Every structure is written in C-alpha cells, then in structure tokens.
Image (cartoon, rainbow, N blue to C red):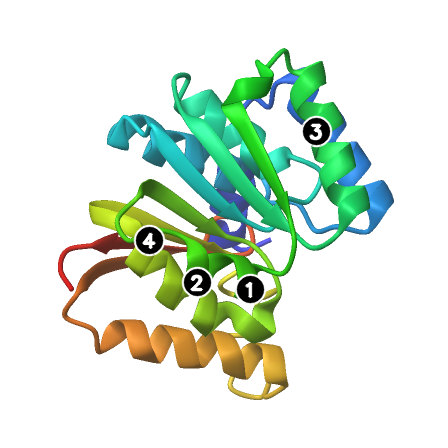
Amino acid sequence: MAKQDLSWKFAEEFPVEPPATQLARQHALELGADPISPAVGAQLAVLAAALDAKNILEIGTGAGVSGLWLLQGAPSATLTTIDVELDHQNRARQSFQEAGLAPARTRLIAGRATEVLPRMNDGAYDLVLVDADSTSVLDYVEHGLRIARIGGVVAVAHALWRGRVADPAQRDETVADFRALLTTISESTAVTASLSTAGDGLLQLVRTGD
C-alpha cells in the first residue's frame, strides 16, 4: 500500500465514533443509504464547533449519522434536516432518540429538497451540509450559499464520488455534476473553498460575500 493510502487509512481510523453513531451507521447500511465516513463526521463536528453553530441545515438525512456528528460538535445547535425518504427520517429520529438528544434539537422535514429549500430564509443558518441526490448538487449548493450567513459554511459530502471525479476516464453523469460544481466554485469570488480527501471527499465553502 502506498504511503499516501496508508496516511488516508490512518486518518480515517483516527476518529472515535460514539456508540449511538455507530448504531446509526449500521442502520444506514441496512437501509442502503451511504453514510459519511467517521473522518468526514469528525471534520463536520470541528466545523460546527469552530462556527459555534446554533442553526444547522442538512440536505439528506439518511439514518442520522451526519446529524449526530454535527450536533456532537455544536451541543447548543438545532438541526433542520430534509429528506424525501420517510423510512430514512423515521430511522434518523430513532437514532437521535437513542443518542439522548432532546426532541427540540432536531426538526425533520419530509419532502423534496428542491421544493423545500426555496422557502427557506436567506442567511438563516451557520452551517449547511449537502449530502443528497447528486444530480441536483449544483442547485443544492446554490441554495445552501443563499441560506448560509456571511461567514457560514456549506459542506458537500461525497465530492470526489468514489475516486471517480479525479479520474479523467470517468465521464458518467454523477461525475460530470461534481466536476461542474468544482469548476463553478473555483471561479467564484463569493466563497473560500477547500476540497478534503477525507472519506469520499468533503468540499468546504465559506460564504464570504454575495
């Protein structure tokens, strides 16, 4: 194994995932969801803590893995999470209960994000996580940057899409969508951006202007 791969593996195994989050991960896999890795979860927790986040929005609930990591980093935050899959949200609700979170700390919205996001207020959130349908990722990020406050963060999970985004030979629709997003972001003067190789890739955007 190459040294770079060893370093990636070491970083992935470094975070200690709480038991409730481990259980939520198991449930996610049973549902066929694709949960973020522990390393990505830890990065999200650090972002939430650094922002002293009070209001967090998640696009794509899954079984609650990412939500638990976000709330671990921001113990006084409220999480609003959107998903069209009712069984995912029901499982996430159970995961939040098993983690001992007060019901008032989570707000689960069942519906299509493309229909819910336009109704959300500008600048209302400290941190927005995009972890949903890749075919709408550009739309989600556009809304996320509108919804995030100045100085807030929009994070995009799976931004390297199983290592395919970096491979020029890969040209499927999902890869094209993520490449289009990365190209658009690289040309934007309204954000400061970083692309981490943690997990399946984590794009991090700080909204610096309009």
Residue 61's image quarter?
A: top right
CA distance separating discs 1 and 2: 6 Å
**Pointer 1: what residue?**
115
The correct choice, above or below, for 73 with respect to 171 in the image is above
Q: Are marks 4 and 1 in contact (CB under 8 Å)?
A: no
Foreground: disc 3 or disc 2: 2
Amino acid, disc 1? Glu
- Mark found first going from the N terminus, 4 or 3: 3
Tell me if 10 is positioned left or right of 143 in this view: right
Which residue, given by chain and number where applicable, does mark 3 sit on?
A: 93
Observer-nearest of 197 and 85: 85
Q: Residue at (52%, 30%) from the top-left corner?
A: 69
Q: Are marks 2 and 4 in contact (CB under 8 Å)?
A: no
Across and down, in percent, residue 152 comes to 25, 45
- Distance of label 2 from label 4 (alpha carbons): 9 Å
Residue nearest the observer in this picture, 93 or 186: 93
Q: Which numbered disc, 3 or 2, marks the residue that appears first in the sequence?
A: 3
Badge 2, how many Cα within 10 Å: few under 14, some, many 20+? few
Please name the amino acid that badge 2 sits on: Pro
Helix, strand or loop for disc 4: helix
Label 4: which residue? 147
Helix, strand or loop at label 1? It is: helix
Q: Earlier in the sequence, mark 3 or mark 1?
A: 3
The residue drawn where x is 30% and y is 43% is 124
Q: Nearer the viewer, mark 4 or mark 1?
A: 1
Quarter of the image where one finds residue 90:
top right
Q: Disc 4 to disc 3, how far (Cα)? A: 24 Å
Residue 178 placement, left or right of 142: right
Q: Position of residue 30 (x, y in %)?
A: 86, 42
Tag 2 residue? 118
How many residues crowd mark 4 within 10 Å: few (<14), some (14–19), many (20+)? many
Question: Percent x, y for residue 202?
Answer: 44, 53
